[in-house]
Amino acid sequence: MEPALQQQADEQRVLDIIAIAQHRDQEALVRLFDYYVPKIRAFCLAKQPGANLMADDIAQEVMIRVWNKAHTYQKESASLNTWIFTVARNARIDYLRKNSRHQSDIDPENLWQDVVDENADPFKDMQHHRDQKRIKEGLDKLPQEQKQVLSKVYLEGKTHQEASEELSLPLGTIKSRIRLALHKLTIYIKR
Amino acid sequence: MTHYHPSVEMLTDYAAGSLPLTHALCVSTHIEHCHECQQQLRKLEILGSHLFDDVPTEPRRLDDLKQNLLSKLRKSDRVSDNSHPKESTESKLDAFLEDYSVPKSLRQFVKKSYDQLSWTRLSPSFKIATLYNEEGGAQVALTRVKAGAHMPSHTHTGDEITLVLEGAFSDEAGIYRKGDFIQRGANHKHKPIVTKDAECICLTVLDAPIEFTGWFTRLLNPLIRRHHPFTRAEG
């Protein structure tokens, strides 16, 4: 999609989430459903290929959370895509926790809650846009081998050890590819 | 000011949601008060959202799912009379009941105060309270050591994460203060000492039980093992 059209579509989705928060606008929810549900399903299927029922359940749960929590979305703190990604990630963790053989009592809702940035300043919005742009552009330029490892971790939800086994690479190589990638994306600065 | 943070790999797994929940509990508790890691997490989540946005989707008819969702929402909105879900005030009130403020991520296990937990005394200056035993997995516990006390010299038989919640302690490698996040591998042997000004409370996650190495404290090892889920699952 053209960048200008892309931006317009992104802005429309932000208006949609505001409309849900303010007037419980179902048409706005349907538009977000059409855009995000295929992505959420794909995100779940990346973790467990073929698990269509799980993908449907999680996608539905994410849309329910969007409907109920739309008023907590702050456009100054995160793009809508980032917000939906975190909601989907949390719903996936929760689903897997409740349906796994070893059920955990630790409630993920308490662990991945929205961190309120107390040092907020007027430049936050600007800085956020700059980070968004820098990470997006960096990701497009990343060598395939580094991108592949990031996808294993983020989309397939693999541990570094599992990624190392699946790609038949030493654990050290996986770790260094992740570090290199994060360094290029200016996410990781050696402390 | 926090000096010891989770590794970038661990933060990445946390942002991706692939970190085991016991480890995520420690990371989350650290992040609550670490501005630096909050910033890094924010960027790692932006990265996640771009990968999420690019994920290849498959064509599939989703009309049934959509209708099902909409009818569910109509029902739930009728029940809740169009109001937003109420925020719980319970945990906010509890924070005032004690001297120490319990981090949000721990309030599931520490309802009111550290004092009200069931502590097991392992020595005159060292107490432990188990928060959660994962079935066949890690143990999440709080340790409480008196000001100026030496903790018994011990070796880890698995990975250990320690997060300082109150006070400070030191070992051969450095001094650790409130908010510091320390990860130790198996076979790491150390002898921590709590600073003299205040008691030290830490959150610990042990993948396998620790083993005391002192001549007298070795007698405590069976007790420690009995409390750890890893040993119970084996036995």
Image (spheres, rainbow, N blue to C red):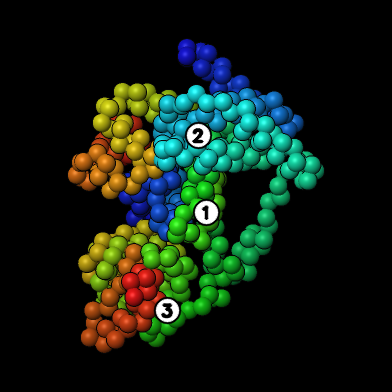
Residue at x-position 35% and y-position 41%: A153
- Mark sitting on residue A41: 2
Left or right: B17 with respect to B231?
Answer: right
User: Three-letter amino acid code at disc 3?
Assistant: Lys
Does residue B166 appear in this view?
no
Q: Are marks 1 and 3 on the same chain?
A: no
Q: Quadrant of the N terminus of chain B?
A: bottom left
- Mark sitting on residue B127: 3
User: Three-letter amino acid code at disc 1?
Assistant: Lys
Asked if residue A46 is positioned above or below residue B26 in the image, the reply reads above
User: Three-letter amino acid code at disc 2?
Assistant: Arg
Chain name for mark 2:
A
- Disc 2 versus disc 1: distance between alpha carbons? 18 Å
Labelled pair 3, 2 in contact (Cβ < 8 Å): no
- Disc 3 versus disc 2: distance between alpha carbons? 47 Å
Left or right: B188 with respect to B131?
Answer: left
Tag 2 secondary structure = helix
- Residue bearing mark 1: A98
Please tell me in which quadrant of the rendered image residue A135 appears: top left
Labelled pair 1, 3 in contact (Cβ < 8 Å): no
Residue at x-position 64% and y-position 59%: B92
Tag 1 secondary structure = helix
Q: Where is residue B26 in the image (x, y as percent from the top left)?
A: 42, 58
Q: Where is residue B184 in the image (x, y as percent from the top left)?
A: 28, 61
Q: Judge depth for marks 3 and 2 and give the one in front.
A: 2
